[in-house]
Amino acid sequence: MDILVQRQLDNMATGNGAYLETFLRMVKRAGMDIRIVFAPWQSFGNRPWASVHPRLAGFTSAVVWPGAVKIGNRYWSTSPRVWTRFAVRLAKEAARRLGADIVIPSYLGRAISPKEAEIVAHVCDANPAAITLAEYSSMGPALKKLKAKSIHACLMHDLLSDRAERFREGGQVIDFDETSLETEIGWLSSCDLIFFISANELAKVQRYLPNTQMAWVPPDAPDYQITENSGAPRVVFIGTVHGGNAEALNHFLDDVWPGIRTKAPTLDFWIAGSIGKTLTPARAALPGVKVLGRVDSLESIGGANAIGLAPTRFATGTSIKVAEYLLLGMPCVAYPLALEGFGDALDDLVVTAPGPEALAAEILSLAHDGARRAALSDAARQHARARLSHDDAIAAIHRMLADAAKA
């Protein structure tokens, strides 16, 4: 499988980095070799050097980056346009630090340029893969430039046309290219197979491309060790640095946690993962709050006495934290939006609350009811792994390969 990429892959502290790792692991389980092919200019963004994170590179048989030279473990662009963008980016950053109101946009949502698409297609055609997959729909135009026979596929981290609407609803700055659903469907129109991170986005796109094979790739189900149901009850939030995570965590600390702590003065709130570094000193110092940072063994904070929290108010893709809580044997409380990306697969395993008051009430109930926590923990351990299986996605790959062999 060739995977066509138009972004840097050096950061594993983001949701799309974690999900790409999940996808690559699934593809390897399907028995396929993986080659990553980068768009020569857009993949660098505003920085003329980049690397591939070792956790991602470990799944690949080769990495191809046209228009770049590799020195050590780092790729350097040879394109003047990339270096010019870097100079402009430095100037904007200097102005921003001096107080200018400047939004520095990402390239997410921007379609690959026709010239870059031709370069990427030429690289793939020189050594055709059984499946050529675009990461994000905006890389889809490169598939249409392919001349060699290959199954066209796409990995949809997000339905990009929905992303801006979600950001706007959440009061977030839109720092990426907006696009329409019609445009996005056009980018996907040559695909034979599309993988979705979000089950509800799959259902939406399927209406427009009814003859395209589609498969849901749920969050990974790591082989966590058995968690101990030890320690005092506590509330736990696990998250990477992400706009939706930051908004959810700040909302909970500002609007929900103080009231909970008043009624349960011994209850603690643990914050695990890189999201903790985004907190203001005032929020980090709230009573009962413990910022753990990166936790090497999530089993150490899981179990029936750890109440997993997902107060998601705007989101795209799928909430990985909900899956992690369940796989760690944790009772989980969430706003309904946090479950949207799972379809109805986890509805009976998660306690949902429609708003802040209901969220606080459910947390307090669980904190005081050990039997309820244990029942939710047992149900999660019994059912979550099977419901997050990648078997359907692997079967879709095998079906496409079998059909192509017959053609």
Image (cartoon, rainbow, N blue to C red):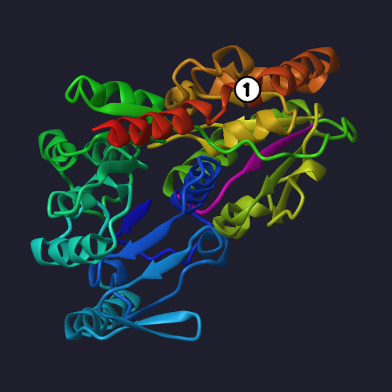
Examine the image and state in which quarter residue 82 appears: bottom left
Question: Compared to 223, does 144 lie above or below?
Answer: below
- Amino acid under label 1? Ala
Q: Residue under circle 1? A: 386
The magenta segment is 234-242
- Residue 247: image x %, image y %? 46, 43
The quadrant in which residue 76 appears is bottom left
Q: Which of 63/261 is in front?
A: 63
Q: Residues within 10 Å of mark 1 (few under 14, many from 20)?
A: few
Task: Using the image as rendered, state which of residue 194 and residue 82 is in the foreground.
Answer: 194
**Residue shown at 33%/40% (left/top)?**
158
Query: Any magenta on residue 218?
Result: no
Vertical placement of residue 167 versus 260, above or below: below
Q: Secondary structure at mark 1?
A: helix
Quadrant of the drawing holding the C terminus: top left
| Residue that appears at 28% across and 56% down | 128
Is the residue 138 above or below the residue 322 in the image? Answer: below
Identify the residue shown where x is 50% and y is 21%: 355
